[in-house]
Amino acid sequence: MQKPTVTDANDAPAVLGIDVIGIGAGSPAHVTVEAIEALQNVDVVFALDKGEAKADLLDARRVILDAHAPHVELVVVSDPPRDRAPADYAGVVRDWHRARAELLYDAMTRSLAPSEGGARRGAFLVWGDPSLYDSTLRILDRIRGLGAELEVRVIPGITAVQALTAAHATTLNRIGRPVLVTTGRRLGERPAGTDAVVMLDGAAAWLEHADADEEILWGAYLGTPMEVLRRGRVGEIGGELATLKAELRAEHGWIMDIYLLRPAGTTDAGE
């Protein structure tokens, strides 16, 4: 879908300024000073409405705006639906990103057109950090493909990985050891013996792809009043943890969880 380019007063293509701001894993205290300063200098924040089940996520953005930039307009766009268990996962996600891009470009065209006061700047508030398992920057690339002239600035944020290790008062890596960051869908591809942080696990992949004697450091709703933490050997708490995750999803209508897998009892001492 090719859309007309937004133009300035001289009918030249207008450059739309966009800040992509990491807002941390859930706590309002995760919002950095740099992020607050960026927020205070934009005119519009764009957000995708994921429906009633995830209304908490949209409400959290409103709380941040009310606290730090109450003058900023919040423009909400309904998130297009997608198949959550597709045969062609990559293809479905690409189509979903394209649909998102078209809807957001419509909103940006309406909200960021230059006015008498000059150019307007927009922003997206991203959970965690925009670099880690977030689609915002990819969607902005797709919007460029629709004809938009964008100038994008990224403000980093605290990731769920950092929030998880802080909550469990542990380090992410062992001395001299690599850490794989992957998804529940890809956990089975992990090389043997590799420590792993697992994100976007729609089920309980540790039951199938972790050794019983591995330690799992798990957290859900990190940084929020709903935060839940568990730690133990997979063989001892894995089944109970899967049940807990299902119960929390049913209670709240959604869940964001993350976990670290590594050999149980390993410390840096003596390595």
Image (cartoon, rainbow, N blue to C red):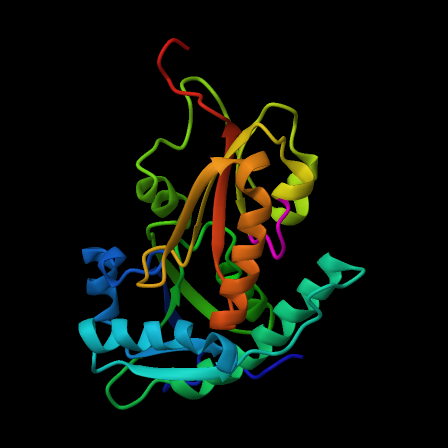
* Residue drawn at (40%, 49%) of the image: 229
Of residues 86 and 6, the one drawn nearer to the viewer in this rendering: 86
Q: Is residue 137 above or below residue 238?
A: below
Front residue of this view, candidates 97 and 29: 29
Q: Is residue 7 visible?
A: no
Task: State the residue in front, 268 or 215.
Answer: 215
Task: Quarter of the image for the C terminus: give it.
Answer: top left
Residue 143 to residue 169: above or below: below
In which quarter of the view is residue 45 placed?
bottom left
Position of residue 67 in the picture relative to residue 125 (left or right): left
Residue 13, horizontal then vertical, whole percent? 46, 77
Based on the picture, tell me whether residue 201 belongs to the magenta stretch.
yes
Q: Position of residue 169 (x, y in %)?
A: 30, 36
Q: Does 135 lie within the magenta span?
A: no
For this orientation, the residue located farthest to the bottom is 116
Q: Quadrant of the N terminus?
A: bottom right
Seen in the image, is 94 located left or right of residue 172?
Answer: right
> Magenta-highlighted stretch: main secondary structure?
loop
Q: Which residues are magenta?
A: 200-205
